[in-house]
Amino acid sequence: MDLNITDEQYEIVSAVRSFLSDRCPADVVRASEPDGFDPDLYSSFCEMAGPTIGVPEKLGGGGASLLDLELVCEQIGGFLAPIPFIEGAVACRALASSGDPGSQLLDELIAEPATAATIALCPAVDGTAKLVPYGPVARLVIAMDAGELVVVDGHSPGVSRANLGSSSLADRSLRHPGRTVLATGETARATYGLALDEWRTLMSGALVGLGEAALAIGVEYAKNRVQFGSPIGSFQSIARDLADAATLVDGARLLAREAAWAQSDDEGQFAPLASMAFLFATRAARRASNVALHVHGGYGFTLEYDIQLYYRRAQAWPLRLGDPRRGAADLADALFGPVEAR
Amino acid sequence: MDFRLGPKSDAFRAEVRAFLDEHLDEETIERAHRTGTNHDKEFHRAIGRQGWLAATWPAEYGGQERDPFEMTALRDELRLAGAPTDGMGLSVIVCQTIRRVATEEQKADFLPRALAGEICMSLGYSEPDSGSDVASIKTTATRDGDEWVINGQKMFTTLAHVADYVFLLARTNHDVPKHKGLTMFLVPLDSPGIEIHPVHTVGGERTNATFYTDVRISDHHRIGEVDRGWDVMTIALTFERGGFGLSEADRVWEQVVEWAKETRRPDGTRVIDDPYVRERLATMRTNNEVARLLAYRTSFVAATGGLPGVEGSMHKLFYAESMTADAAELVDMLGAEGVLQRGEDGAPVYGWVEHLFRHAAVTTIYGGTSEMQRSIIAERGLGLPRSGR
């Protein structure tokens, strides 16, 4: 057993953290609202670590493992960075695993990593993918459409929709001249299923980062805010909630990393672990941001304080994939097999 | 990163399973459950003969020098099997502490017998008026020549009725701050003047209240320096937390899944196909995985030379609290029959869920309450100012 990250991973994480700390402070996050996308930030980020780093080296990518990507996503979540890294990385890996039909587009992405690519996380309805993350700005969209795994190339930018998490979201038409079928039938389902599990894992990482950062804000506030003559962090009802949230976040981090590790090292367990990680990271991020907001008292619900940025996103981000409790039902299918036909 | 315990642990795990097949029968498990005494002399000796009470110890003590991950595998298997291990846990805590603070003469007297499983230890810290605030204890030890005379009362002296010694904290100095006037003793439980009264818990376990009236012991039974008992207990507490990975929550979860797959409702549907059942079991499985990872992290910190204080507290807090919440969900999930106890006809999952519900509440309190764990996490982990208690 080794729960430490490697020196190489530590270097990547440090570089990403220092970049985001410099380039993505809260006012940059605020300035990206309501669109939820910062193109300048994204192109600079891609010069350091674009979403093609997760593509195998033999295909021209960076050869990063899912765990490497998860570690990067913890940082992205911690800074609430408005960039399509998670969806982009998942889309690139799906393209890479689809062979010939996607290879030309993949080459273009590798040549131009800041080209935004994304994946539709909900099944398309009548040829339209609903509420696609970064749908307003992505050139490439990967989606399941009537049993086919497709990639659609071309700007048909949907209209960004006002939403709780100030995310970049739009419907995208898949019946488009730039539509390429990547796979059909069982292969399509398997590739898309794997992509969703990778998304769950990377989003778990982002939620862990979000929860950790929200908690740090709450802890800092509790240390400095004085009421009744004492820092409020010395009051047990405050300390108790922060301690519980810290425990959830630590547990969620271990589980997200375990899921990411399993993708390459314990394949049989990857799908259930990805579902568990996503369920738990959702719970941890929501609890941590809720507690941290609450610790602020009245200031917590003012727009002026940053904690509201975290609180809204902790609720909104997991919903890209739909009702989280539905996720528990999917996990049950993975653990216990399907419900017996009557 | 690597989340596997590793080949050494896997090999040891197989060894432990084979041992349990041979030495642990249903009757022993059932007896422990029925009596609430989670200790069996024969089984304890068998573990001792196997060298597993000293599994992590250096060879000079007859130990096997196993690493924390092998110990995790050992404890996992014992818990999954439902083995009666209270005596093992308590004896290891006391022996580890003796090894660090006792004299060579004391080590030679107590350790070989204890590590062989010939004798068993219990703990005597808590008192009726001193729980989390242990330093406020009132039991006294008064020097009389080469002897000490002990008077007072201890609470929750688990296994005192079957153990040979109690590791007892007593006040030896009234003229100094409360932490500084305490001394630790290893008191033979067959000494005249000791009375043991049973205390039964909601979890079905039997513990004890123990009474000490003019109990005379030699200075040979003093462990550590006079008035330094607090330091001795602090060392002992570091051996009390963490260490196991899988738990009774994992065991019961597996039993429930198996039962739910093979049990049908009057309408012919399998229990496992009920969406309320599926969601609860999936959620509990997730919590169990997190508890296991928090436990493994504790072992990892210890294995890499750290002192897992906050990590151990996070594991203890999460394991106990989530097991309590999940056990309540499982009882609800079983409906009206969920209340039926082990031995009753038609008790779902052989009554193990009803038992887990009662047992889980106990785990949030013993070994340091959830409230104490939260204080440790808040103050030492998050750096929040010390609370007014």
Image (cartoon, coloured by chain):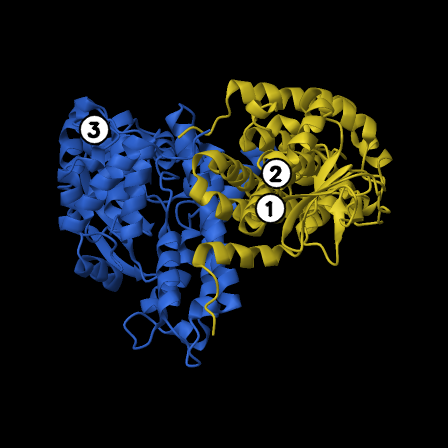
- Mark 1 or mark 3, which is nearer to you? 1
Q: The residue tagged with tag 3: helix, strand or loop?
A: loop
Image location of residue B341, percent across then percent down: 34, 71
The quadrant where residue A244 appears: top right
Q: The residue tagged with tag 1: helix, strand or loop?
A: helix
Name the residue: 22% across, 54% down.
B195
Whether residue B116 can be seen here = yes
Q: Colour of chain B?
A: blue
Gap between marks 1 and 3 measured at Cα: 49 Å
Residue in the foreground of this view, choosing between B348 and B371:
B348
Locate residue A216 relative to residue B67 in the image: left or right.
right
Q: Which residue is mark 3?
A: B64
Work out whether disc 1 and disc 3 sit on a shared chain.
Answer: no
Quadrant location of the C terminus of chain B in the rendered image: top right
Residue in the foreground of this view, choosing between A129 and B265:
A129
Dot 3 crowding, Cα within 10 Å, few <14, some 14–19, many 20+: some
| Residue A68 numbered mark, or none | none
Whether residue B112 is situated above or below residue B273 in the rendered picture: above
Q: Amino acid at mark 2?
A: Ala
Residue in the foreground of this view, choosing between A129 and A161:
A129
Circles 1 and 2: CB atoms closer than 8 Å: yes
| Residue sitting farthest toward the bottom | B266
Q: Which residue is mark 2?
A: A94
Q: The residue tagged with tag 2: helix, strand or loop?
A: helix
Q: Give the letter of the chain under mark 2.
A: A
